[in-house]
Amino acid sequence: LARVYDCGYSTFCYILFSRVGDPLMYGMGALAIVFLVLVFVPSAWAPWKKFAIWFVPLATVLFIIYPDTGANFWRPAPEQIFQWVSGLYVIVSLFVIGLTLFRK
């Protein structure tokens, strides 16, 4: 377990670090931003949770099925998709939180 990063050229390590690690890296930053805002607006927790319950599984399915082929103009790299979806998550989450804040 201490030698996690020393797995050589195994396929398992590639899948673990690129197909699982990249979405987690971008997704955790997005979650940190949203949770920081939710600390200051606790009344928005319930509406935001309704949004997150359907968005996170859809994003997960997109991350799983998106092909890891060469990137070009019409097909962006998976890392770009992870960034765009995480950015969309933050924008929509802040919109839901803001809408809840203005309704009260």
Image (spheres, grey):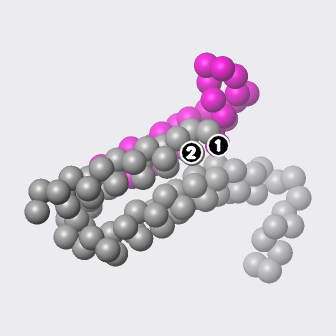
* Residue bearing mark 1: 79
- Between the residue at mark 2 and the residue at mark 1, the CA separation in whole angstroms equals 5 Å
| Residue 64 - label | none
> Badge 1: how crowded within 10 Å, few (<14), some, or many (20+)?
some
Q: Give me the residue at 40% from left, 63% from top.
A: 34
Marks 2 and 1 in Cβ contact (< 8 Å): yes
> Badge 2: how crowded within 10 Å, few (<14), some, or many (20+)?
many
| Residue 82 - label | 2
- In the shown orientation, is residue 87 left or right of residue 38? right
Residue 65 at x, y = what percent? 53, 37
Say how many tags the image has. Answer: 2
Name above or below for residue 1 compared with residue 52.
below
Residue type at mark 1? Glu
- In the shown orientation, is residue 67 left or right of residue 93? right
Name above or below for residue 13 compared with residue 45.
above
Confirm whether residue 20 shows in the render.
no
Residue 97 at x, y = what percent? 27, 58
Q: Residue furthest top?
A: 74
Q: Give the quadrant of the N terminus.
A: bottom right
Secondary element type, mark 2? helix
For the magenta stretch, what is the residue range?
Answer: 54-79
Name above or below for residue 63 compared with residue 44.
above
- In the shown orientation, is residue 15 left or right of residue 104? right
Confirm whether residue 54 shows in the render.
yes
Q: Is residue 61 magenta?
A: yes
Q: Give me the residue at 70% from left, 56% from top.
A: 17
